[in-house]
Every structure is written in C-alpha cells, then in structure tokens.
Image: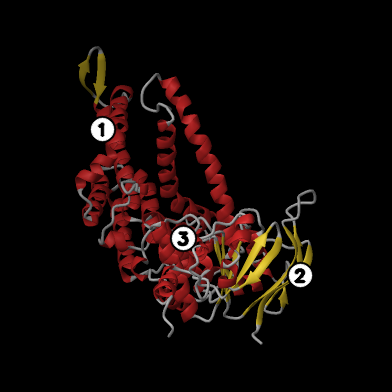
Amino acid sequence: MREKLIEFRNVSFRYGEEEPWVLKDCSFSIYKDEWVAIIGHNGSGKSTIAKLMNGLLFPQEGEIYISGKIVNQETIWEVRKEVGMVFQNPDNQFVGTTVQDDVAFGMENRGIPREDMIKRIDTSLTAVGMNDYRLTEPHRLSGGQKQRVAIAGVLAISPRVLILDEATAMLDPKGRMEIMNTVSNVQEMNQISLITITHDLREVVQAERVIVMNEGVIWDEANPREIFAKKDKLREIGLDVPFIALLAEELKKKGISMKNEPLNHNELLEDLWTLHSTM
Amino acid sequence: MNNSLIIGQYVPGNSIIHRLDPRTKITIIFSFVIFVFFANSVPSYGILTLFAIITTLVTRIPLRYILKGLTPVWFLIVFTFILHIFVTKEGSVLFEVLTLEIYSGGVIQGLAISLRFFLLILITSLLTLTTTPIEITDAIEDMLYPLNKVKFPVHELALMMSISLRFIPTLMQETEKISKAQASRGVDFRTGPFKERIKAVVPLLVPLFVSAFKRAEELAMAMEARGYQGGEGRSKLRQLKIETRDVFVYILFTCVIIGLFLTRTY
C-alpha cells in the first residue's frame, strides 16, 4: 500500500452562502509519486479542487488531509511547503524581474539561506531546461518558457506534490509540448506526485490515473485507457474526444477491432500493422 | 515585442560607475545635490563641474546620448539664464537692450544658477543611466530599513516597486494589443481634434484597467500559493555589497567636498 499524500474526505464547497455547490461530497486520495489527471469541462469544480489542496480555499464541509495533516488556517504554511502550484496565466504568476529572481521568490518567502538558494536555482532551472535564461526578463520569454520557469520555482522548494492547474491552456501547441515533456521529465527525475488539471483529454494519456469531474461530483476514476473507451459518455458531459480515439471508433464500426484502446498515434499504428499477425 | 522601451533610460555598461554599489551612488549623488548649493566662487564651481564631467566620461556612455536626454531641460536652463539677466539689478550696467539695462551681476548670477541647474540634472541623470531600476529599488529598501522601527512598510514598498517594474513591459504590450484591437474596430487614435483624440483613449484605458485588476488578483493568489506572507522571515537572493571601489569613491568624493569648502568664499 502506497503512502497517502492527499486525502479528500466528503468535501463540499461553495463560494458563498447563496451560491450553488461547486463540489459535492467528493472523496478521493492521491498517493506518493503518482501522476493523476483531473479532467472536466469548465465549471466542473476541477480548479476548485486545486485551490483547496493548497489552502487557498477551505471546504465548508468535510476535511482535506495533506500527508496526514488537516488543512486549516493554522497549517496552510506547512501545507504550501508540500504542495506547489502552477496556474493558467503565464504572465500573472511571474513575480521576479528576471528568471532567477522569480525562481528565488518562493525560497525567499521561506527564508532559505542565499548560498542554498543559488544552488537550488541552478538545479531547478536545469531540470526544466531554462538555465541559459537566468538573467532574462519575463517579457522576453515565450508563454511556454514562462510556465517552465514557474515549474522551476515550484521545484526549488522541493514540494511533495506539484499541481498544474490548466498550466497549458493559454499556450500554443509548441508551448504545450514543451510543458508536457518538462513535466514528465520532472516526474521521472524527482520523487514527486503530479496532479494535472485540464479539460483536454489529450493531456491525460501519460497519467496513471484519471479523475473525471462533472458538475461538482466525481464522475469516474480509472486509468486513461478505460476512460478513452467511454467516448460517448465523455461527449455527453462536454469533453472533446481526441482525434485518435475517434478514428479508432470509426475503424471499429468498419469491423477493424483493435486489441486495446489506442492512446496516441504510435499505439494506433502499432495496432493496425500487427492486426493480422498471429505472433 | 516591445524591446525599444528603456525604463529610466538605463544604459548597460561595465564601467566602474555601473559596478558601484547603488547605495554608494545614491548617497553621493544626493550629497552632491546638496553641496552644489554651497558653491559660490569660480574655483568652487570649477571643482564640482570637473567632478561631474569626469564622472560622466568614466561611465563611457556616449555623450550624444546624455545630451539628447537633456534636451527638454535645455529650455529651462536658458530660460533661467535670461530671467536672471533681466531681473537681477546688481553691479554695473553692461549694455542696454531696448531700454532694458543689463547688469553685470545679472549675467554672473544667471550663469551661476544655470550651471548649478545643469550640474544637478547631469549628475542625477547619471544615477538612472548607470543603475538598473531593480538595483535602485534594492538600495532604497536597504537605506530605508531603519524606518521599519517606526512601522513604515519598507519591504512592501520595495516589493510594490519591483512588481511595478516587472509589469511595465507586460502592460505596454497589452496597451499595444488593445489599441490595435480597438483600431480594427474603427477607433481613431491619431487624427481628429484634440478633444476627439482624448475621447478615443477611453476605450483603450477601460479594458487595460480591467485586465490590470484581474492580473493583480491572480498575481496575489499565485504569490500566496508560493508562500508569501510579508517581509518577516524572508531571505534575499539579490545582495548589496560594499567593495573596495565604493570606499575609494567615497574618499575621492570627500576630497572634492573638502576642495569645495576650501575654495568657496565666505
């Protein structure tokens, strides 16, 4: 049994007394070194989950535990040491005047000594491949580069969980690729749990587990392959099914059935060219 | 990308003046501004002018650039001079222009005040020309540190300054984007009477403000998520350090001031 890092126990949340519930009685756990994707269309409550994990919001009902500690006003600073977050807008989370100042910001807040900071800036910028830009100002960076710096800033405080809250939503396809590659590298290198929050099904393929949110409740929880197999239902709750999954479905209708649900280009190709092989 | 913007007209360089601790520069320039008013004889003005000119040359910033930067001020300097010529009525009459008598005292005083003015502007512009805005912010934070004792929010002030500096280029880009978007919808920013052009600024400013507030809100949230809880218990990456060259410059400046007091008339 792996160590439980984050646990939601019957969590409900709404933004005000009169407002509708954004989350209704949600319970789930996230384990150590795991990659979980949380997916849902706009207003499904997925971003609220991220903010609850970091103590930016507090639930009205239920409890949240981060590595065994309950999240409340007294423990938020402890919690924020363990949970790092990258937000959607690359510009609005860049605090420093240069790349290295921004990476240092989180460490400065925690009073980490300067010598230590310099070392950590170096390792975390190398991890995201931005070490050549240490003295660059934010307005000279692309969106993808800014998000990589934001990831480096989180890594520098060595949290146990990294949450990407729609971190690729405002990027172009190239920037999105950059971030997804960086993230999977980071997860391999560091011992860190990863939570990616997205509305794009293409971004869940690398995750070990997918939590699908709909209207504030957990609609489904499974591995990506199982989720991809439920195309019709996904479409019903307003999610875009990726092209490869659609293609596989059309092929199935034509009588070409594959061994398992393909997640990407290569898997589909692999399935197709080995279709008649009996090996 | 708007790369032509130079905040505070900083000119990158590697001269000794560029590398001086910003606190040294601020202290010396501030005291220079005060000591300029003590000069009252030709040699005392000479010493200060020499100091200012040598400092300017040492920065290795092209003189053309500095003089161009002073263009708007030339008018004021000349105006002060002319005003003094006509208003001050001391000393002997030199000559008459259209029934106005020009006194020697007026000319001398005009020259002195104009020179004083020129020195002040030259030396203070050297500060922003050789120091990055963020260095100035750090220096201000450090120098105002004692005010913490009287509950003056020094750290918050410095953070505000550095965040503003960081967002200036971002907001400039945004302004450009919005003005293009509005222009494509038919807003005319360039032609028409002055009143109309002022009115055209409204559809530019409103979206800019809305987005600036939204940015501020998101930035606050991101800062909080990254563990920001005010100035207490914070460490700093950027550090200011007094080097030998700073001590050397202090000694040199003290000599200049001693020279000034030896040569001024009492």
Instruction: Look at mark 3 in the image and give the residue it sits on.
Output: A96
* Mark 3–mark 1 CB contact (< 8 Å): no
Disc 1 is attached to a residue of which chain? B
Front-lying residue, B153 or A203: A203
Instruction: Name the secondary structure under disc 3.
Output: loop
* Mark 1–mark 2 CB contact (< 8 Å): no
Q: Residue at x 59, y 51 (%)?
A: B217
Work out whether mark 3 precedes mark 2 in sequence or the reverse, and give the earlier one. 2
Instruction: Name the secondary structure under disc 2.
Output: strand
Give the tally of numbered discs.
3
Of badges 3 and 2, the one in the foreground is: 2
Residue at the bottom extreme of this rendering: A1
Q: CA distance from mark 1 to mark 2?
A: 81 Å
Front-lying residue, B174 or A172: A172
Q: Which mark is residue B108?
A: 1
Residue type of the residue flagged with mark 1? Ile
